[in-house]
Image (tube, rainbow, N blue to C red):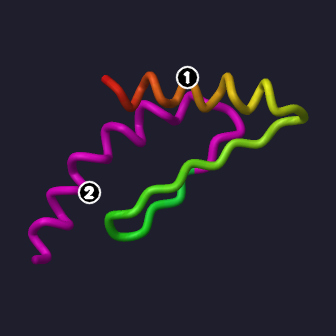
Amino acid sequence: SPLLLILFLLYIASLYKALEKYRNLTIIGFIDDTNLLVASRNVQENYQRLEGVFKVYKR
């Protein structure tokens, strides 16, 4: 139902706002799918960024 998509977007908007502070983080959203993409020069830094993002998602 279209209403479910609208409600989902309203729910997820605050999460997207909270993730704006992360550098080199790209959020790709389409309908009810969300993908997070991080980029840096090494794997450890990517891991740390994704770990921080995960903590935001858990809240």
Q: Nearer the viewer, residue 44 or 17?
A: 44
Q: What x and y, as percent, mark residue 11?
A: 22, 46
Q: Is residue 41 part of the magenta span, yes or no? A: no
SS label for mark 1: helix
Residue indicated by mark 2: 9
Q: Nearer the viewer, residue 41 or 15?
A: 41
Q: Identify the amino acid type marked 2.
A: Leu
Residue indicated by mark 1: 52
Residue at 52% across / 55% down in the picture? 35
Residue at 42% across / 69% down in the picture? 30
- Crowd around label 1: few <14 · some 14–19 · many ≥20 (10 Å): few
Left or right of residue 43, residue 16 in this image: left
SS label for mark 2: helix
Q: What x and y, as percent, mark residue 18?
A: 42, 31
Residue at 21% across / 56% down in the picture? 8
* Magenta highlight: main SS: helix
Q: Nearer the viewer, mark 1 or mark 2?
A: 1
- Crowd around label 2: few <14 · some 14–19 · many ≥20 (10 Å): some
Residue 22: quarter of image = top right
How many numbered discs sit on the rendered protein? 2
Specify the segment rendered in magenta.
Answer: 1-26
- The N terminus appears in which quarter of the rendering? bottom left
